[in-house]
Amino acid sequence: MAEYEVNTFLERLGLTEYEAKTLSALFRLREAEAPEISRKAQVPKTRVYDVLDRLTKRKLIIEIHGRPKMYMAIEPEKVFSTLIGEKKSELTQLESEASTLKEGIMSDATNGKHEKVMKVKDKNDFMKILGQEIDGANESVIGFTGMGKEFNVVRESMKKAGKRNVEVKLISKILEEERKTAKEIKDAGISLKDFDHGMNAYIIDSKKVILAISDFSQENPEYHFTIWPDNRHMANALSKYFEHAWQNGKEV
């Protein structure tokens, strides 16, 4: 294998340029003094001792005490295994930190008390935002919704919520061509009734309200909706209308 390929691979595993060159050179020399390693690796003599010291502390090479001091290579397979293990550990730590940061960001974004009025140019974008809100549900989701093609964007979030034991109840005016989607939703454990309500509104955990302001049944250049992160009065009012609609709705 070409020397530059080994050097590049070692750098990808987290070594600096000089560390990679030094380790690669020692692979070829097997055992050598620092000056010879410096020449072979093309690493300045003023730097090679520091580099060798770092590699020794990381247990990637062996220092042999004596006069003169020698350095011995470890089998490449063991070196690669050690470095890959460090990378995996680093990635695990990054995943953990990413999860913590995500929770913090989502908490900051949703804990505010003020409503947000938003607009999108595509109904699917509204559904994507709705899906993210449903992904954060802990107890319940009730919704006045449609079952049109844009519903497919949020369908998986609905099903995942059901699997998390979040109670999901939906009311929709179900057209004949939407029966298959309705059956799939019911088979996933989501409660569904047929009722002509003409709304796009969702209540999450009895406090968060997502309410469409525009008529989503029509094609418009843009669509407006609002999100109240914590508006229990509005949530309660919509919930009461939902119960009325639910009682008058038809089983699917």
Image (cartoon, rainbow, N blue to C red):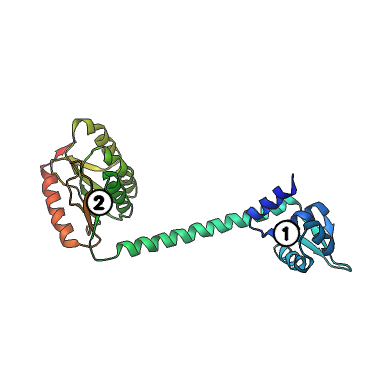
The amino acid type, in three-letter code, at marker 1 is Leu
Badge 1, how many Cα within 10 Å: few under 14, some, many 20+?
Answer: many
Secondary structure state at the residue bearing disc 1: loop
The amino acid type, in three-letter code, at marker 2 is Val
* Residue 118, quarter of the rendered image: bottom left
Q: Residue at x 67, y 55 (%)?
A: 82
For the C terminus, the quadrant is top left
Q: Is residue 82 above or below residue 112?
A: above
* Residue 141 badge: 2
Q: Residue at x 72, y 62 (%)?
A: 55
Residue that carries the numbered disc 1 in the rendered image: 60
Q: Residue at x 74, y 51 (%)?
A: 76
Residue occupying the far right of the picture: 67
Residue 176 appears left or right of 26: left
Secondary structure state at the residue bearing disc 2: strand
* Residue 60, quarter of the rendered image: bottom right
